[in-house]
Image (spheres, rainbow, N blue to C red):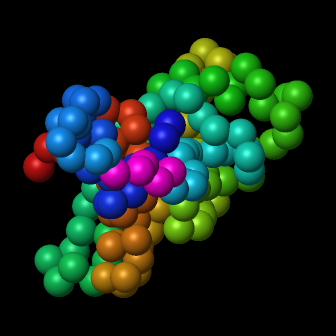
Amino acid sequence: MQCLSSRTSAAVRSGARPMQAVAPRPVRNVACDAASLQFIKGVAEPTVPEVRLTRSRTGANGTAIFVFENPSIFQASGEMGDITGLFMVDDEGTLSTTDVKAKFINGKPQAIEAKFNMRSQFEWDRFMRFMDRYAAENDLGFEK
């Protein structure tokens, strides 16, 4: 994925050719990390989860619940290591939770559910910035 800075012209972003009378502005590539969810640090989970959000009336607390149906980590976890939590990694850093549970049906793993608690407005805002990045990369929408 290529990240474009705010200095990139609209013509370059849209793929249109700039008019000849105007010299094209140079495109600056800005290094950025893709937003990813990881069960093992450094290994991105390709399965896109269902995410449910709750928030207190005051806005001071919130919870995000991630449900991964048949995640690929079930096939590879033996070779790569143990699941130690859910890590939300982007260019600002890493958010994490260790509240991760596997759901089994007839002895076979079917889903992973992870819960991330936010205890302040700052944590809520940081989580929402991560989710904006993750949603943009994975074509997710938001429903109230």
Which of these two is toward me, 80 or 138? 138
Q: Can residue 57 be seen from the camera position used here? A: yes
Residue 90, how many percent across, how many down? 54, 57
Which of these two is toward me, 26 or 22? 22
Q: Which segment is the magenta one?
A: 25-29
Identify which residue is drawn at 34% across, 51% down: 25
Tell whether position 27 is magenta: yes
Horizontally, residue 60 falls left or right of residue 114, namely: left
Identify which residue is drawn at 64% across, 38% down: 44
Q: Quadrant of residue 40?
A: top right
Identify which residue is drawn at 39% across, 34% down: 138
Q: Residue furthest left?
A: 144
Horizontally, residue 28 falls left or right of residue 78, namely: left
User: In the rendered view, would you say 12 is above or below 107?
Assistant: below
Horizontally, residue 144 falls left or right of residue 82, namely: left
Q: Can residue 88 be seen from the camera position used here? A: no
Tell whether position 7 is magenta: no
Q: How many marks?
A: 0
User: In the rendered view, would you say 126 is above or below 16?
Assistant: below
Which of these two is toward me, 34 or 52? 34
User: In the rendered view, would you say 48 is above or below 27?
Assistant: above
Residue 81, how many percent across, how many down? 85, 39
